[in-house]
Each structure stands twice: as structure tokens, then as C-alpha cells.
Amino acid sequence: MYRQVHSGNKAGAAIVIMNKNIPVLSLEQFKTEYTVAVSIGTREQAIIVVSSYFKYSLPTNDFIEQLRPILDREVNTIVGADVNGHSTLWHSSESNERGRQVENLVEDYLLHIMNVEGTLNTYDRPGIGSSNIDVTLITRGMIGQVTNWSVTDATDSDHRVISFEAIMARPCPEPGNTRYRTDKADWAKMTAHLASHVGDIDERTVDSHANGLVMLLKAAADLSIPRTRTAGRSPGRQPWWSPELTALKKLLERSRRLGQRDNEPETYRAHRNRYLAEIRKAKMATWRALAGDLNVNPWGKAFRWAKRKGAPPSTVQGNLRRADGSYTESVEQTAELLLRAFVPDETNGGSFNHHGPLDDGVESPSASEVKASIWRIKPSKAPGLDGLTAKIVRKAWPVIETTLTRLYGAALRESYFPLSWRRANVIVIPKGGDKDPATTGAYRPISLLPVLGKALETFLIKKIENETSLNRIGEQHGFVQDKSTITAINTLYNWVHEAKSRHVMGTFLDITGAFDNVSWSPLLNQMVNIGASPSTTRMTESYLGNRWAQIKLESKMYEKKMERGCPQGSQLGPTLWKVAMSELLALPQESNVKIIAYADDIALLVGAARHDTVVARTESYLDKIKKWAVTYNLSFSPTKTQVMSIKGGVKPGYQVRFGTDEAAPRITAAGTVRYLGVILDPREGYWNHVESLAEKSKSLYSRLRTLASANGGISQLTSRTLYKGVFLPRVTYASEIWAPGVKLKKSIKKLGSMQRPPLLAMTAAYRTASTNCLSVVAGVLPLDLEVVKSALQKRLKRGEITLDQFKDHETEIFTEWQERYESTDKGEWTKTMIPSVRERYMLPMPLDHYTTQMLTGHGDFKSKLFKFKLVASPNCGCRGGSETVQHVLYRCPRTENYRKELIATMASEQEGWPPSNGAFLKTRKTYEALRKFARQSLKNRSDR
Ligand SMILES: [Zn+2]
């Protein structure tokens, strides 16, 4: 796969690297819309390559000033620039002002011009002109290393191709990561190899045992499973490329070589147009296939695409800015900076020394327990450095069962975690969004650990949780069975409601990088304090010690030893975090103070009779929380900490110190806070929450619309699946908390407008139809009622209400909906077609563009089009008056034959004509007859 460097969508300059074995670093600090620079090679052997476009409409000097800081670095540099200026230096017949400015740059930096006299002009546009404006500049150190400069007419661009060779020491690439293609595995071959060698494993020590087993598994996998390099497609081949395109491209190139562009422009243009048309067609076909895929499989490729905002960028890992503002200069330095950010150094001087004798009583796990620990891991989850997925281990299980069970037993008895399973493969993923890509904060590390180590971790988790009753210490709602963000928010409100104090204030704390930074020695000490056995503590110590993270950048490996933090991607991490938190949660609390945690989210609630007492008490508790944080080498971000008066009606805007220290940073109280994904306000009105949901829901449906606009588009059925499967779950998150808030008129309205895009997609309706009608036609509850119903469903599931109570509430919801439907003056026609919302809701009705028009009366009817000034007259082509939905359905002679058929079907279902209200929804047959009539009378009309 090729890599490219450019800035944004409107980039004026770009560098594309076709050879994946060249280490390349994009120099972000020099990147502008018209200039990009990369560093190629290693620190010892680096050259800088620059591409620059001196846009004609802008002053030449702007671009020269962009080049100067690059040349100031005095590194061997090659500049390829479209300078849009003339100079005798690059063999123009004379110099112009723009050219002279570039001449100054050449002089200032003693640059050497590579352009050769007597070659083709670099720019040639038939009818416009031909000149030399593309210049290749090199620094003095490059003289002699850049050779064979030439211009060829090899492409279709007005600018000709300039090629040259630059010599530098060839870097020696290391082999890429390999993955096993388990779909092509010969499992019988693998198990046969395992069976004949499993007896050879050296089981004398835990490490030799683990290494021997992993080596054998890898050898067996190598023999029986094909491997794939992670690098993708060949360069330049788009997913839509076809052999026809290759042929057409060759024809076009031949035509150009024959000089037809100038001699037979007609022929040349014909070749070119065919080629471009074929490209468009191929792209469109792929696009349609993508949209088609969405119809068949709404969770497939296309959905992932829509979710991800298009294809991921394939750009070079740029250089990064350090905290002091300087930039990394090489791939090595970038790797070092990333590792330092993701794997922080320990700066706490604490120590752990509770080493007691090993207990003899450690039980070995049974084979079935070991099996269960492996089966817990998803078979296809990305493997650790050994490449062994859970699927491979599962297939090997019958053969390795005994030796693996013995190995886990030995590890647990000796409280020793095998060394090779402590090494994480760190993959760096750009977070995207508005993060500055030149900072480490813009990247998310994903740690991949070996499957066999992760399975062993589950035994350690069980030991810790059983010995310490960890999940019963204080109010920890994260990573605890039967607890969730909802139970955390409920606990908060229940406490506030039951508090006798007149004032209650909440402080919501943000720990900076909590999991990655927690210190190990206080954690191990706390483990002992809450009752972990010496063998469990010792095994945890072994698990954490000598732990490495490694990262691969530009085909080289870099590594760093971990000194603190809960290992990312591990099974044990959350448990270790709960141990650290347990010390805070076990702090003695007065009856008017409450600390609630969800993972690393901490809410501190303080009550008192007077507001100033609440503030003072909060500040003194913040001292205690800060002290806990210092012990664990954690820090809070005061700017991200939120304060709100939950009870007592104190206006926001007052300040609370982050602790009792006079110099402590101050936090300004707000009117709302975001807590565990819900925006809380003191009145529990949740208007702000609804508003933020509306903002978020915009993007998903707009991306899906992009897909729908491709020929074919997504079907109404797929839209419904996406609505039920993606849209609703997102909107109704924590509905049991905020559902009481949707009684507000403005919330009902806001939710209604949020629901409109999905409703339009589900019904394929005209945009003039009202939301009120659309939800009825679509057969989905208005969004505020969806929220109420979802809250009821969740309460039913948790056994908080009975099924009968649920049904009563559901009836109330339908009554409310029916009343709302009837009371608006919009959609009178829909009301006659679909009189009962509940009946419609219960009836599966396939929808299409034509049937929806018949049901809403909004559509391709001249009376409607006339209203929007789209046609000159409202009258039907039959001269029978205004063309309305009633006219088409009841009267128009042009639909006479279709109508006869419809009337006959209605009669066979005991329905007369004109039909009674709701008659078309009577049976499946009557509805299908209406659909047929709609299609026949509204599709392919001759007068349109
Ligand atoms: Zn008519």
C-alpha cells in the first residue's frame, strides 16, 4: 500500500511514497496547503524531500518564506516546486519578477538547479502555452547524488513528469507482522504436529514450560496455517479498478505516445473520455455494491463505513511536537515520545515489601476451568506478539489440555507469571476528530497481549476478588456485576432525595489518564490491607514486574519497560484499578457526605444546612481525595472537574477551591454537569441532555443519507433496522434516568425534529409531509414516547414493575399518541387512511415511495406541486380538475383500470367503495392492493 503526505482535501502539494520499505517521517511543522516535506531514511542518513506549489494568485514570496525554515535545517534536501515563474537559471528564455524572487532563494542557500537545458518544457497545455516553471532544487550536499534528471510526457497532466535518481544508503527493512489466516488452516495437520511433539516440552520451570508450549504452537501453526502480511493491496489499485481499465489506460498512453494529443485531438479525446467514463462507471458500481451490501447486511461493511466517516486515511506517521514545543526529528524519536506518553515512568518513590512465605494451600485449576478461561476470549480477537489467536488455541486444546493445565497450576502455585506473556504489542491508532495530529494526545494506544497470558489472568482475578470482597467496598459501580452507569446515577439521586440537608453540592472529578498512571507499590500494599493472600499479592507483583510494551513504526520495533499503570488490553487491569479505588471509597464518610465511583469517574456529594458549609466541607474532602491521588501518583484535572448545586437552589457561578489550600485552583460551579453520559441539571428537567442528543444524532443520519443518495440507495427496511438498532439505542441510553424529563414541550419538539430524518428514510416520503403523520405511516412511536417506553421496558426487565403495570403504561402511551395525532390540524388525509395509531403500530406494513404518497397525500400530485410553485397549474391532465390524492384514488379516468382492480379486491374482503376510513389496513390483501394501485398510478407517468 502506498503512503501519502498532503494537507487536507484541498491540498496544493503532495508526496506519495510507493515503496513501503522506506522509513518516512512527515515534517508536520512545515506542512501548509501548498508545501509538504518529509524526511526519508534514518537519523544518520536522512534527506528531506519537499513538494511545493507556488499558486499563481498568491505572492511568490509567501512560498519562498515557507521553504526557508526547511532549508535552514541544513539537511540534504531536494525541492520539487511549481514556481510559476521564469528564469534563465532554469532555461527560460528570460527571467520575470516571480523568477527573480526564486533566484534570490537559490543564491541565499547556494542551491543547485537540476533542470537540464534542451529538454521538453515542463508545462504544456495545448492552446494555452508551453514553458519551464517546474524546478528541481537540491542543497549542495546532494550534488553528485542526484542524477538522470529528465522530463517525459508520460501522463495526461498539463505538467509533464520530471524524474531523477537520488542515491542514499538503502535501509534494511525488517519483516512485517504476520497473521495466521485461520480460515485457510489445516487443523488436522496442526494437531498431528502438536501431538507428536507435545511430550518434548521442557516443563522444568514455568518460563521454560510457557516458552516451549508457545514455540510448539507457533511451529505447528506455521506448518498448517498460511500467513498473511498485514500490508494491504498493491500500490495504486483502488477497490474499483478492473482489467478493462488497465486496457483503456494502455490505449490512452499509446495514443499519447503517438502524438495524437496534438495531431489528432479528436481521437485522443475519444480515448480519454472512454477511459474517464469507465472509471466513473466502475466507481459507481462499487458504490452501488456498497449500498446493496447495506440492504442485505445492515451491520456490514457499509455500515462500518458510515460510522467511521469514510475510509481511514493512509498517511505517513508524522513527526510529533514535544511538550516544550520542539519537534521529533526521526522515526526513533517519534517512537520514543509515543512510548513515553503511553508507558509513563514511575516517579513515586514508594515501595512494596510484604513478602511472606508462599502458602502451600494454593489449589491447581482443573482442566475444565482452564478450558473455560480460554473459551472466554473471542476466537478472532487480535492476537499478541506470538500471533496465536484464541481460535488456534481452541483447536489445539485437545492435544495441549494436560500440559497447559499443568502450566497454569505451576504458575499459580509458584505465584509466577510467565515472562513472555508480559510483553504487549502496542498499536497506535489516530483518534481523529479535531485533535492536533502533531501531539501524542491525538493517538490511542491499543495493547495486544498473548491469549494464553490473558486466560491465566482470569485465575488471578478470581483469587483477588474472592479474597478481598473487592466489589463490596464502597460505591464502586464500574466493572461490577449487576452494577452500571445507571445504578451509579440512581444512587446519586436517591442519596440527594433522601438527604436531610437543605443544600447538596456535587463535585465530579476527572483523573488524568487514571489507568495508565496508577502506581504499583501502593496498589500492592492496598491489596494486602484488604485481605489478599501472600501468594495472590506475589503473583500480581510478578505479573506487573518486568513488563514491556513494544511499538512498531516504519517497520522497526521500539520498546519500553512498564513502571506503572494497569496494563491496557489486559483482563486484570480493571480489577487492579478497583483495588486502588477501594482505598478512596473506604475513607470514613460523615452521614452528609457520599462518594460514588464508576471506574475512574468520581462523584463527591456533600450536604449541609448552609451553602458556605457545603463549600467548606467539599474543600476539606477534596484534600482527602487529593491525598489519595498523591499516594497513587495520580492527578486531577481541575479544569475538567465540574461542580453543581444539586439541591438548595444556589445560582451557578460561585467558586469552589480544589482543596483547603489558599493557592488551590478554583472551580466555577455550573448549571449542568455531564456525568456518565447524561447531562444532569438540578431541576431534573434534562433539557440540556435532549439538546446534546440532538446535536450528536445529526452526523450519523447525514452520513447514511450520503449512502442513500447513491443509485439504489438504502431500502426503507434497512433504514428501519438502522433506526431500531443504532439510532434508538443511542438516544434512549439511560432513558430510565431522564425519561421523566421528556414531558417538557420543548423537549418533545426537539426530539420530534431529531426523529424526522430517520422517519423520512423509513417512509421514503416527500419532505412536505409532517412529522406527526410520518411517525404514524412509519409505525414508530414519536421519539419522546419511545424514550418513555424504553424506560418502562428497562424497569420491567429489572423487575421494578410487573408485566401488567407495563401494559397499562403502554396503553397510556398509545392514548397519548392517538390524541396528539388527532389534535393537530396537519395530515387530515393520513387520518382517514390510518385512523388508529395503535392498529398501525401492530401491523407490519412494507413501505415504498409510492404507497407513502398515497398514505400521506404528499407527493407527485399537481395540486401539491402547484402549491410549491413547481408547476404552472394544479389541474390534472385528464381535465377533471385539481390533481389531488383523492382525485387519483377516486376519480381520475386515467387510473380507471387500476381502480377497478382495487375495488374488486376490496369487495372480496367485504369492503365497499368509496372505502371506509382505515379500510386499506384491514387485511394484508387490501393493503397489498393499495400498494399495487399506488405503484401503477404514480410510477412512470406519461405527463411527467
Ligand atoms: Zn385526472
Image (tube, rainbow, N blue to C red):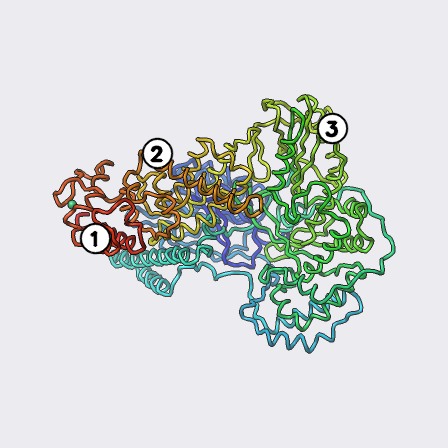
User: Are dots 2 and 3 in contact, CB under 8 Å?
Assistant: no
Q: Quadrant of residue 182?
A: bottom right
Residue 638 seen in this snapshot: yes
Q: Earlier in the sequence, mark 2 or mark 3?
A: 3
* Residue corresponding to mark 2: 823
The amino acid at mark 3 is Ser
At label 3, counting other C-alpha atoms closer than 10 Å, the crowd grade (few under 14, some 14-19, many 20 or more) is some
Q: Is residue 123 above or below residue 680?
A: below
* Residue in front for this viewpoint, 317 or 117: 317
At label 2, counting other C-alpha atoms closer than 10 Å, the crowd grade (few under 14, some 14-19, many 20 or more) is few
Q: Is residue 697 above or below residue 718?
A: above
Instruction: Residue 594 in the image: state x and y as whole percent.
Output: 69, 34
Marks 3 and 1, Cα distance to the nearest angstrom?
81 Å
Which residue is located at x 23 percent, y 40 percent? Answer: 865
Left or right position of 51 against 890: right
* Residue in front for this viewpoint, 354 or 841: 841
- Tell whether circle 2 marks a residue whose Cβ is less than 8 angstroms from ligand 1: no
Identify the secondary structure beneath mark 2.
helix
Instruction: Residue 52 in the image: state x and y as whole percent.
Output: 47, 45
Which residue is located at x 76 percent, y 53 percent? Answer: 540
* Residue corresponding to mark 1: 903
Q: Earlier in the sequence, mark 3 or mark 1?
A: 3
Q: Quadrant of residue 601?
A: top right
Q: Between tags 2 and 3, which lies in front?
A: 2
Q: Which quarter of the frame holds ligand 1?
A: top left
* Residue corresponding to mark 3: 620
- Tell whether circle 3 marks a residue whose Cβ is less than 8 angstroms from ligand 1: no
Identify the secondary structure beneath mark 1.
helix
* Residue in front for this viewpoint, 863 or 433: 863
